[in-house]
Structures are given as C-alpha cells and as structure tokens.
Image (tube, helix red, strand yellow):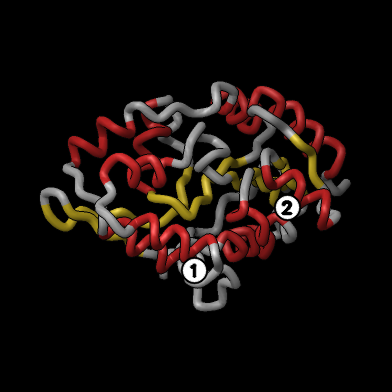
C-alpha cells in the first residue's frame, strides 16, 4: 500500500480531514451512481452492509462491479453533483490559517476529483478508493488505503489516515456527517459534525461543534485553531 510523503512543516499544528459524501457533496455520489446505472443486486449488498453482514470494502467492490455505464455517462452524471456552497470559502479560511485540507473518503477517487475540479477545488488532496474502468461499460474498485486491522472492514481506513497525521505530531480536525465517520471521530482531536454524526458525538462524549453547512464551518475552524492549539 502506498503512503503519502511526510508533509512539509506546517504553519499550524492542525490538519483538516473531511469526509466527502453527504459532507462536502449534497448527496452520496456512489449511491446516486448505483441508482442511475446499477444492475440488479446492488441493493442486496447495501442491505447486507447496513445489517453488518459484510464490510464496506466487500459491499463497494460488489456494487461497483454492477455498474453499467460508459465514461461519458459517468462524467455527465458527476457534472450534476452539487457541493456545499460554503465549502470553497471554508478551504480559503483553512489556507489563510496555514491548515491543509484533505478529503478522506470511503468513496470513489475519480468521482470525488471530478466533482471538486468542477468547483475549482481540484488541488485538494483526495484519499479514497480507486475507480478503474475495465471495459467500455464495466468498472472495478481497488483499495490502496485498505487495512486488515480496520474495525469496519472499510475500503479506506479513515482511522489509519488520521493516525498517520497524528504520528507526525499534527492535530486532526475531522469533518463528517454519518455512520462511516463514527469510528474515526472518537480518535480525532476535534470534530465538526453534521447530521447523524452530531448525535453520535453527543452520546459518546466526543469533543465537537455542530454545523449545518460549511458557511458556518469556517468560523468554527478558525476558533478551533486559535483556542485549541498548544501554546
């Protein structure tokens, strides 16, 4: 498995790691692709994952194999995917503070990169599962960030991505919204939570701030960096 190079000495001790689907994007991109182009069987895999019978890696691998779409179909669909209108401003705030923003997702790298590039954010580092076209209308997914130690059997172990930055003596501000963020949120130095992740952080006593859109998150980022940094 490839590993990212150690980053240059940061201007601050903080790094942002953000989920993509439902957090940055306004809908789950993989689910939307399956609804548009998935052959029969993908909902069965989704149900098995939701019931804890299989991990997300097995689920995603099977679902991607059931996608019936051309590259043109894929890109036309991705061109319709909207992101949170405040996310670009959030990135601007982070850059002004010297804080790197990473997109860490258990989704599909090509889809995420395409959507971000459409919104002028193609320079952001994306760590996600690798989508590979194998024929005109068939696809597979590879897992360069998978881990046998992952408690959720995820394609991309977010906990290991977070631990890597903490091992470089950085503090991680994690941003997320749902079930795939539950495990990693308990290991972050601070969490910006929306939707289902808010209740989880409250129930588990995880240090967090709730937000509904990235228009609010820039202020929360600035406050976190200014008030929670080690002097």
Upstream in sequence: badge 2 or badge 1: 1
Residue placed most toward the observer, 109 or 66 = 66
Label 1 element class = loop
Q: Quadrant of the rendered structure where residue 157 is?
A: bottom right
Q: Is residue 147 above or below residue 35?
A: below
Local packing at callout 2 (Cα closer than 10 Å; few below 14, some 14-19, many 20+) is many
- Residue 83, image x, y percentages: 49, 28
Residue placed most toward the observer, 152 or 169 = 152
Name the residue at 64% across, 33% down.
Answer: 94
Local packing at callout 1 (Cα closer than 10 Å; few below 14, some 14-19, many 20+) is some
Residue placed most toward the observer, 65 or 175 = 65
- Residue 126, image x, y percentages: 45, 47
Classify the position of the N terminus by image quarter: bottom left
Label 2 element class = strand
Q: Quadrant of the rendered structure where residue 86 is?
A: top right
Q: Is residue 221 above or below residue 33?
A: above
- Residue 13, image x, y percentages: 73, 48
Q: Is residue 222 above or below residue 34?
A: above
Q: Depth-wise, is mark 2 or mark 1 nearer the camera?
A: 1
- Residue 166, image x, y percentages: 68, 60
Could you tell me if residue 3 is visible in this image?
Answer: no
Name the residue at 25% across, 39% down.
Answer: 74
C-alpha span from label 2 to label 1: 28 Å
Name the residue at 40% across, 62% down.
Answer: 45
Name the residue at 50% across, 72% down.
Answer: 53
Locate residue 23 relative to residue 139 in the image: left or right. right
Check residue 55 in the rendering and tell me which mark sits there, or answer none. 1
Check residue 146 in the rendering and tell me which mark sits there, or answer none. none
Residue located beneath label 2 in the image? 171
Whether pointer 2 and pointer 1 mark residues with C-beta atoms closer than 8 Å, the reply is no
């Amino acid at each position: 498995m490839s590993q990212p190079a150690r980053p240059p000495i940061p201007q601050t001790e903080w790094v942002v790691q953000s989920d993509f689907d439902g957090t940055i994007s306004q809908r789950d991109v993989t689910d939307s692709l399956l609804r548009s182009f998935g052959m029969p069987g993908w909902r069965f895999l989704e149900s098995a994952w939701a019931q804890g019978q299989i991990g997300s890696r097995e689920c995603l691998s099977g679902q991607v194999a059931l996608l019936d779409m051309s590259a043109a179909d894929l890109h036309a669909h991705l061109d319709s995917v909207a992101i949170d209108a405040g996310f670009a401003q959030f990135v601007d705030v982070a850059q002004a503070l010297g804080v790197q923003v990473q997109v860490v997702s258990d989704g599909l790298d090509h889809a995420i990169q395409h959507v971000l590039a459409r919104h002028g954010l193609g320079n952001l580092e994306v760590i996600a599962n690798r989508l590979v076209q194998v024929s005109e209308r068939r696809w597979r997914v590879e897992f360069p960030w998978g881990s046998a130690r992952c408690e959720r059997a995820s394609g991309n172990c977010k906990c290991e991505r977070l631990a890597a930055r903490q091992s470089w003596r950085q503090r991680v501000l994690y941003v997320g919204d749902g079930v795939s963020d539950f495990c990693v949120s308990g290991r972050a130095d601070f969490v910006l939570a929306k939707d289902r992740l808010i209740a989880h952080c409250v129930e588990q006593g995880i240090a967090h701030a709730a937000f509904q859109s990235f228009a609010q998150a820039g202020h929360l980022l600035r406050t976190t960096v200014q008030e929670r940094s080690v002097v």
